[in-house]
Amino acid sequence: MGRKIAVVGAGYVGLTTGACLSHLGHDVTCIESNPDKVELLSQGRIPISEPGLAEIVEEGLSSNRLRFTLDREAGVKDREFIFLCVPTPQDEDGSADLSYLVQAASELKPYLQPGSIVINKSTVPVGSTHVVADALGRSDVHVVSNPEFLREGSAVADFLKPERVVIGADDSDVAARVAGLQLRRSAPLLVTDPESAELIKYASNAFLATKISYANSIAALAEAVGADMDDVVIGMGLDSRIGSSFLQPGPGWGGSCLPKDTSALMYTAQSVGYSFSMLDEVVKVNNAQFDRVVEKTEQVIGGSLEGMTIAVWGLTFKAGTDDLRESPSLEVISRLRAKGAKIRGYDPEVKGSSPILEGIEIAVDPYKCCTDADALVVLTEWPEFSTLDLDRVVQELSSPRVVDTRNVLDRVALRRRGFVYRGIGRV
């Protein structure tokens, strides 16, 4: 039997959560403060690139199980479950800004029905469940933590077929009611206290960041000793205790989650007097990796980057998304520009300029991106890059020089065509 649910916030997490819950048979109202977005979504038009999301939004709208509204009062009326999916951006000191969360809870306070459950799905530091409860000030309303583990590019699949569901609640009956929303999802269920649930989310993302920084450090060592990181990753990944995911070297980690959540975890540790020195080194290794890519570009150029035109393939933080937030590509580009390079970029999901892309000439296709460029740098692992015509790339570049930070290109084929080549962890 479907339940009545409200989702506050129709951003990446909120939209996916609301649409997927409606797909599971629940009656869902998504509350969003941006009128333009409400109008867009009510027409079934999706403002983000996420495979499968448009289809289940359309399904929800057609079945009338999914609606979008600006009206908080109407949106939570008679709703048994209320998911909070609002932004928690990073403050200057590295902590998470909970102002949107507190504001949402305060605005909902007068309209919640007794016995309803407010479910915090925003990524928040330890103790935030109690922050929400205090902002609500309602002893007749329950607050639980239910962190999201959605990967951009596979969020719909991650929600409908998750690897685990975590619920943090002080009341086992309340936890069981929340778990009942997801009975169609066969996945390990962990019911714990709110503090542990909140820490699980941060600890998971920080560990993924640690694996990537470790892989990039091993890749640097592989280059120095003449080993091949591709084979090293295979050999390590065959150990079930390690696994191969997040061991691929690259230009560094980024995106909307890892940098923010890693900083927030470090801030949490500092606030309780623990020096998380290992995680501090993870961040330092990542920043150094951005600089290593610039150094590799200087190596293939054979000197200064001043006045050089660098073609860049890939601007989003990873393949399968249009998200540019905290993209490693943009970190590297910023450093290349600081060295005096001119940047022309191509990405299949970037169709025009925006403030975040200031100073980057956007090309309409990967070949025009290379026209008369002094070197090519591959920064995002889009599959199409491995299938492009290398002979045409040679013709477009002023000189055949490439830095492949994702190891997606055929280095043998490149060198056969006379390329000066640098990969990550490859010789």
Image (tube, rainbow, N blue to C red):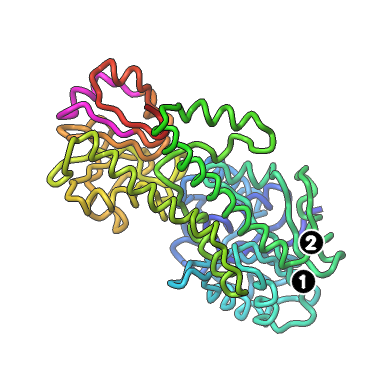
For residue 350: magenta?
no
C-alpha separation, residue under disc 1 versus residue under disc 2: 20 Å
Amino acid at the residue labelled 1? Ser
Observer-nearest residue: 301 or 127?
Answer: 301
Above-or-below relation of 310 to 95: above
Answer yes or no: do the residues labelled 1 and 2 have beta carbons within 8 Å? no
Q: Residue at x 23, y 29 (%)?
A: 401
Q: Residue at x 81, y 62 (%)?
A: 175
Left or right of 270: which side holds 312? left
Amino acid at the residue labelled 2? Thr
Left or right of 385: which side holds 228? right
Q: Residue at x 60, y 69 (%)?
A: 274
At mark 1, the secondary structure is loop
Observer-nearest residue: 88 or 243?
Answer: 243
Left or right of 270: which side holds 426? left
- Per the rendered image, the range of residues in magenta is 388-403
Q: Residue at x 67, y 58 (%)?
A: 200
Which of pointers 1 and 2 lies earlier in the amino acid sequence?
A: 1
Identify the mark at residue 192; answer none if there is no mark.
2
Which residue in the protein does label 1 denote?
116
Counting every numbered tag in the picture gives: 2
